[in-house]
Amino acid sequence: MDQMAPEWSAAPRDYLAEDPATLPLDQFDVGRAILFQHDAFWPYFARMRREAPVHYCGCGEFGNYWSITKYKHIVQIEANHEVFSSDVTRGGITLRDQLADFVLPMFIAMDPPVHDFQRAAVQPIVAPGNLARLEVLIRDRAQEILDNLPIGETFNWVDRVSIELTTQMLATLFDFPWQDRRRLTRWSDVATAIPGGGIVDTEDQRKAELLECLQYFLGLWNERVNAEPRGDLLSLMAHAEATRHQSPMELLGNLLLLIVGGNDTTRNSISGGVYALNKFPDEYSKLLGNPGLIRNMVPEIIRWQTPLAHMRRTATRDFEFEGHKIHAGDRVVMWYVSGNRDEEIIPDADRLIIDRERSGRHLSFGFGLHRCLGERLADLQLRIVWEEILKRFGRIEVVEEPKRVYSSFVKGYEVLNVRISSQ
């Protein structure tokens, strides 16, 4: 069915004051970052799954869009890349379009066959043999980080543990200068930032910082392309036929994809696990009584957290979907954060259940050809962190509600203040 945008009064909306139980469905705009910053989006998605699982927003902050909120529908959209394109020239993978004068091609925002060739260039980084070598390194670093945490004092878990561990891993994967590794964290944050949301003030500032990232990496690229091939991500791209002739903006796009994919997602799942176990203390007790549950718990944490809230596609042609007429050029947003709470597929989905059956059945890594390249590395890092935590500490107490990221794409934490009690 065709959709028309509703008429609005001139008065600004207070999105946090609205009641999603009574608000007309045609006034829903779940893509508002403020809803995610205040963890206020859950009842919107619950109602949409019940009443409008394929929902058209004609009042979007970044333009009109369709929301896909149920697990089975997200899988169907993901599987149909011929109709629902990821390509950056059609808009890319986020609800918010890339700027016309600052387009960043990257292989997640490409369709086959180019996507397949570029992805294959960096696939060796997560080959089983390489993961086995990385496991020893991850464990050593996790041990050092945890051993240096203050006991009995309040500190920010996000900065001291989640960011530090994942940034160290990124520096290793890129063979990036160790002393500058926190620049990777900054570029990751800037890449997905909404100007005015606390990370950057303006779009010009965002572009300037990302161009600094490009200039830094171009120096490293020139070193790798003129050296013998090695196993780091930059060398893999510099010597693969599919990626060695990238334009500077395409290189920047793929770099940011790998930085964000290797940083934001894992770091927010590490933080989210601590937060979730505090929300469900019986599950924490279950874990403390049986550390063998960690392997099953890790994918359950990733499901419950859902570190990337959505992925977007763009319709390449008119298409009928679940009784709705989606038009060529329409944005179609797959809300992983909603699909992962779909009780039709995942019973008692709002709860963290660390011994849940089929805990790996979640959408946090996507589905189909764009499924996350680094999922096994993410699982590995979380498993090791929790193994080492349980060797050292009892409960890690969250002392106040976290400060969340201002984004409807990255679902994460800026501050998670905790305290570790002495044993």
Image (spheres, helix red, strand yellow):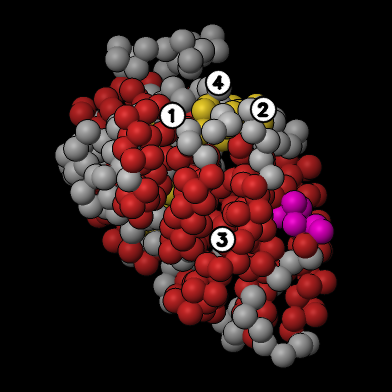
Q: Name the residue beneath numbered marker 3.
A: 139
Instruction: Give the mark nearest the N terminus, 1 or 3.
Output: 3
Instruction: Indicate the quadrant containing the N terminus: top left, top right, bottom left or bottom right.
Output: top left
Does the magenta portion include 183?
yes
Q: CA distance from mark 1 to mark 4?
A: 11 Å
Front in this rendered view, residue 24 or 370: 370
Residue at the outermost bottom position: 228
In the image, what residue occupies the spot 76% across and 88% down?
A: 227
The circle on residue 153 is: 2
Assess whether mark 3 and mark 2 are in contact (beta carbons under 8 angstroms): no
Q: Name the residue beneath numbered marker 1.
A: 278
In the image, what residue occupies the spot 63% across and 58% down?
A: 141
Q: Name the residue beneath numbered marker 4.
A: 400
Q: Which residues are magenta?
A: 179-184
Is label 4 in a helix, a strand or a loop?
Answer: loop
Instruction: Give the mark nearest the N terminus, 4 or 2.
Output: 2
Instruction: Give the mark nearest the N terminus, 1 or 4.
Output: 1
